[in-house]
Structure formats: structure tokens, C-alpha cells
Image (spheres, grey):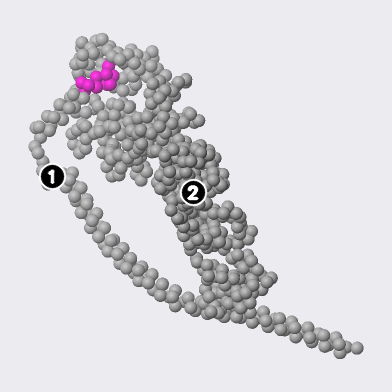
């Protein structure tokens, strides 16, 4: 065949019966001798036997297909099979940055007879059965589980590389994993080169779960550690920290706090920690928190346990309005909805008049204002997180303004704070450094929150100290309203009727758009079919055009060479004829 189209070059290649010893094959970098294919315009030449190489191949050492690539000089690589350098061409996996010599990739795999010698993807050399009588291998460790290979467990090894594996580990190790340390899939690669693990920062060799595109490696120990779902593990890998966390029963010395709940970890309590980074979790915070939950505060999507930078003020809890200062919180990235892990335990429980949803009692808030009195609700407010509707507890219609409580002999009336007798001067009302106290718990209170007050005794009780009594009024009112109210059918519910009407309107608007999209998709399919048809017609024309351009180039080259020779002869004759 005079002309071929080869996958290694974009132009057609012409057959050359006899090669030129001064030129080199672009694939194997050896002298061109014998039959050759070439493109004179690009100076691309290849032996006929090199042109017959398959464009792709599969090899037991790598899970992805390997594609034949011609590499421009001076690019060099190291073969992942024989560990020798290579140039010119290789069978390569671009995604994993994995290279093999063409000769190594096409070398026939060893066929083991029996079970004494096997070929496994974890190593480039054959692995031999380790017999119990070979006592010198008693102290060698499995490269996967890091346990001794001696005893009753079957093991295979390569003495040349001091590489040994349990048979059970070889059969169970995955070739590809997804790990929360890295967004891309990680592929198990055999590498004789030293790398740094992206999990524990330790140096390793031979086996690594790798992402060649991002130059990220994770050693087998870190990649296969139990996750937070493994409740009985002595060591876990938590998504919020890059190093393994070891189980500890007691932490002595300075006060250590849990990164999730900010409570003290020291003392007789089980914790998971990384001593190198002074990073600790209560065992319950590390293992028992669910990774994903469905919550009534955000019914559209599930919310996922996520890691946040400590003391980062960019994220706020949708329930209480406080910033997220702990490391762990629940979040829906799509809706930018964040919930403290403690606020995720709250549930809606209380009814308020015309509002269609139940309200949740939240004890401490920030940046939330009461929709009844328009004043800031710093603590003990009732809130509908879905609608962002909030009211003070004492602004609820069922909560009385005057109460009788066991903490004081006289009735207590809801009153604005602070009081004149608490201030040295009117200017002190705006002094943020002043301290005001509750007479029930004798602790500091927020001076701007309303309190229950006895004028006779100047006795002050903050809302939190009489909360149980106030909630009893809410509970009783809800029960009464439930028993006394008429049962309304779903057909008569005004909220459902409004939602049904809105759904109908949206469906009417969406119908013509869907029809237009379907029409355009059919048109695109026709255009794609026509495009493929035109490409098929253009390809032979392009081949012929490239051949004509190449013939023209060669003809011009020969013509210039002949003209140069003729002009040389003419010059020689004219010189001889001159006296």
C-alpha cells in the first residue's frame, strides 16, 4: 500500500521502499533502514514494523487503557515496569501519568503454573509463594496491612525488592477508590520512587493510591483506614483532618478541647486525636454524628456534616443566626444553608395563630428580630426557620404578661429593662460594660431583654428562669386550639389551595418551553447527523489534497535540484569557453 493514514500523525504517510540511514524513526529513535513510512513535509518517519503497533493496549499493572504516544525530544520518562528511562514513545495513561516502554507493555504476561508463582498488579515482578520453612521471611511485613507475613496466613513476595503481601490482602485490595481527602478518583499504582503521603505526610514507596493529574498520593495505610462509620476502630480517618486520628482513653496535661463541641476532652473520656496537630474529638463527636440528615428546617435537600475553618465568620446558622465557630456543622452547599450541629437537634413544636408552620424554641440568637415588637431577640425566641419568622416568647398571644411563679411570693409583670435604680446615670443605659443580674439565678443577664418584675420588691426574673411556666401556657393553648377547632378538610385549606394554584400556573408556563426544547433537540440531532455525513465526504477529499500537496512539494524539491544542476553545468561550460 503506497499511502496510509496512521494515528500517530495527522497527515497521510507515504511508503518508502528503502530507508535513509541518516534519518531516525520518530517512534523508536533508531536509524531508518528497510521499508519506511514518512511525511516529508513534517519530517516524520516511522519503520513499517513500528507502524503496525496497536494504538491501545491493556496491562495487568494498570487498570486504565494505555495509549501509544510519540513524545517530542528531549522529553524523557521512567517506565513503571522496568524502572528504566525511556524516550521517543511510550504506552501512556495521561490521566494517571503512567508510562511504559513499548517493549515492556507488549511483553507477554507470565502464566503461572499452580500457585507457587503468580503475577499481581501490585508489583512489576512475579511474586513467589512464601513457605513456612523459610524462616528468613518470618520478620517481613505485608505492604498492605503492615502485619507480619509469618504464621498460618498464605503470603507471596519478591525477594529482589523485599516486597511481600498476604494472599487475603492481594485479593481484597481495590484498584480504584474515592476518598474524601481528594475530589478525584485515586488509582492504585506501583511506584519504586519515593513520594510523600497526602494524609500522614510520611514518605513511602512501592504502593500508592494516586491522582496523576493533581500529583496527589495517598499511601495504602491512610487510604484503607476505617472511616468515621467504623465505631470499633482504634484509628480512623476523619474528613475534617488530614492525618489519622488515634483512639485515646485519657488525655493528661493541659486543658484540651474537642474541635466539634468545644467541650473539655481531658480526663477519663475516650477521644480520637492527632498529637502532632493538637487536634482532638470526643469519640461521640467523631463517630456518632450522622454524616447526612433530613431536617424539617430544610426539607428541599438533605444537609451534610461538613468541616469549617475555626473562627470563620463567613457562615451563619439559619436557626439561631450565630456564626459557625465550631469545626463541624451541617450544610447544604446548593442552597447555602448552614445549621449548627446542636441546632440540628431542635424540632418545631409550637403553634402561633395564623402562621402555617410550627415554631421552634431557640435559647440564644443573634441578628434576629421579633416580627411582633420589631425588637432584637437575643434569647428564647420562637422561630420558623423555613419562613424566617421570629417572635419573642413573651410576645406570643398565649403567654400572660403577669405570672405567679414559685421563685417569688408576689406576681411578676413583664417589664422593659434596664431599670432606673440599676443605673448610676441615664448615660449608663448605653454603656455596654455595665453588668446586670437576675435575682433568681444570680447570674448576668442581657439588660435590653424584657424581664418579669415585682415593683414592690424590685425583684427581677429573666425569661430563662421562668421558661418552664411560660412553655406550659403555650402547650395548653395548643391543646385547647386543637380540641376546640373544627377539622378542616384538605379541600378547604387556604394554604393548600394557594399552593395548588401556583403549581398550576407554573405548569402552564413550563409547557410551551418544554415543547420548544424538544423541537430544538430534534433539530440538533438532524444537524449532528448531517455533520457526520459531511465529514465522511470530506475525509477522502482531504486525503487526496494532502497527497497532492506532498507530491507538489517533492516535485518542487526535485525541480529546484535539477535547475541547480543545470545552472552548475552551464557555469562550468561558460568558464571553460572563456580565454
Dot 2: element: strand
Q: Which residues are magenta?
A: 460-470
- Residues tagged 2 and 1 counted as in contact (Cβ below 8 A): no
For label 2, the crowd category at 10 Å Cα-Cα, with few meaning under 14, some 14 to 19 and many 20 or more, is some
x and y, in percent, of residue 478 in the image: 15, 30
Q: Say which residue label 2 marks.
A: 128
Dot 1: element: loop
Q: Nearer the viewer, residue 438 or 101?
A: 101
User: Which quadrant of the figure has residue 512?
Assistant: bottom left
How many numbered marks appear?
A: 2
The quadrant of the rendering that contains the C terminus is: bottom right
Q: Nearer the viewer, residue 56 or 411?
A: 56
x and y, in percent, of residue 61 in the image: 48, 54
Q: Say which residue label 1 marks.
A: 490
Q: Is residue 416 left or right of residue 99?
A: left
Q: Nearer the viewer, residue 241 or 526?
A: 241
Res. 316 visible in picture: no
Q: Main secondary structure of the magenta part?
A: helix
Mark 2 or 1: in front is 2
Q: Is residue 344 left or right of residue 177?
A: left
Res. 56 visible in picture: yes
Amino acid at each position: 500500500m503506497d499511502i496510509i493514514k496512521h494515528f500517530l500523525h495527522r497527515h497521510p504517510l507515504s511508503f518508502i521502499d528503502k530507508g535513509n540511514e541518516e534519518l531516525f524513526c520518530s517512534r523508536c529513535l533508531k536509524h531508518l533502514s528497510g521499508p519506511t513510512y514518512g511525511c516529508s513535509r513534517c519530517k516524520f518517519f516511522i519503520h513499517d514494523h513500528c507502524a503496525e503497533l496497536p494504538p491501545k493496549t491493556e496491562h495487568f499493572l494498570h487498570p486504565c487503557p494505555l495509549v501509544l504516544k510519540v513524545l517530542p525530544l528531549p522529553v524523557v520518562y521512567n517506565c513503571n515496569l522496568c524502572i528504566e528511562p525511556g524516550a521517543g514513545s511510550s504506552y501512556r495513561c495521561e490521566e494517571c501519568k503512567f508510562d511504559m516502554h513499548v517493549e515492556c507493555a507488549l511483553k507477554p504476561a507470565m502464566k503461572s503454573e499452580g500457585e507457587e508463582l503468580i503475577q499481581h498488579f501490585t508489583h512489576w515482578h512475579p511474586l513467589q509463594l512464601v513457605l513456612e520453612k523459610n524462616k528468613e521471611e518470618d520478620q517481613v511485613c505485608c505492604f498492605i496491612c503492615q502485619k507480619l507475613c509469618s504464621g498460618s496466613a498464605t503470603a507471596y513476595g519478591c525477594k529482589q525488592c523485599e516486597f511481600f503481601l498476604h494472599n487475603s490482602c492481594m485479593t481484597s485490595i481495590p484498584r480504584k477508590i474515592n476518598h474524601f481527602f481528594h475530589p478525584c478518583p485515586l488509582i492504585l499504582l506501583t511506584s519504586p520512587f519515593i513520594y510523600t503521603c497526602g494524609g500522614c505526610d510520611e514518605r513511602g514507596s512501592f504502593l500508592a493510591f494516586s491522582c496523576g493529574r493533581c500529583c496527589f498520593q495517598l499511601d495504602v495505610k491512610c487510604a484503607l483506614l476505617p472511616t468515621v462509620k467504623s465505631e470499633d476502630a482504634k484509628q480512623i480517618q476523619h474528613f475534617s483532618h488530614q492525618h489519622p486520628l488515634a483512639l485515646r482513653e485519657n488525655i493528661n496535661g493541659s486543658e484540651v478541647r474537642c474541635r466539634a463541641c468545644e467541650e473539655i476532652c481531658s480526663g477519663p473520656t475516650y477521644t480520637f486525636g492527632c498529637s502532632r496537630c493538637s487536634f482532638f474529638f470526643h469519640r461521640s463527636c467523631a463517630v456518632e454524628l450522622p454524616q447526612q440528615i433530613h431536617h424539617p428546617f430544610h426539607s428541599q435537600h438533605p444537609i451534610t456534616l461538613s468541616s469549617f475553618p475555626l473562627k470563620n465568620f463567613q457562615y451563619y446558622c439559619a436557626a439561631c443566626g450565630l456564626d459557625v465557630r465550631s469545626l463541624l456543622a451541617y450544610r447544604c452547599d446548593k442552597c447555602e444553608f448552614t445549621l449548627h450541629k446542636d441546632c440540628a437537634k431542635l424540632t418545631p413544636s409550637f403553634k402561633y395563630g395564623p402562621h402555617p408552620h410550627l415554631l421552634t424554641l431557640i435559647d440564644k440568637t443573634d441578628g434576629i428580630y421579633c416580627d411582633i415588637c420589631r425588637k432584637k431577640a437575643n434569647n428564647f425566641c420562637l422561630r420558623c426557620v423555613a419562613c424566617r419568622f421570629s417572635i419573642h416568647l413573651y410576645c406570643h398571644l398565649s403567654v400572660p404578661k403577669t405570672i405567679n411563679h414559685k421563685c417569688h411570693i408576689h406576681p411578676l409583670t413583664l417589664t422593659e429593662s434596664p431599670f432606673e435604680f440599676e443605673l448610676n446615670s441615664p448615660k449608663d443605659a448605653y454603656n455596654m460594660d455595665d453588668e446586670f443580674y437576675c435575682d433568681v439565678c444570680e447570674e448576668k443577664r442581657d439588660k435590653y431583654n424584657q424581664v418579669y418584675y415585682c415593683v414592690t420588691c424590685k425583684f427581677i426574673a429573666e425569661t430563662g428562669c421562668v421558661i418552664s411556666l411560660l412553655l406550659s401556657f403555650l402547650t395548653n393553648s395548643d391543646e385547647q386550639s386543637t380540641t376546640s377547632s373544627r377539622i378542616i378538610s384538605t379541600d378547604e385549606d387556604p394554604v393548600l389551595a394557594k399552593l395548588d394554584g401556583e403549581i398550576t400556573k407554573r405548569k402552564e408556563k413550563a409547557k410551551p418551553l418544554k415543547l420548544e426544547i424538544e423541537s430544538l433537540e430534534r433539530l440538533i440531532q438532524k444537524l449532528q447527523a448531517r455533520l457526520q455525513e459531511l465529514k465522511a465526504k470530506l475525509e477522502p477529499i482531504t486525503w487526496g489534497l494532502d497527497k497532492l500537496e506532498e507530491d507538489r512539494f517533492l516535485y518542487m524539491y526535485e525541480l529546484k535540484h535539477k535547475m541547480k544542476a543545470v545552472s552548475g553545468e552551464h557555469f562550468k561550460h561558460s568558464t571553460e569557453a572563456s580565454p
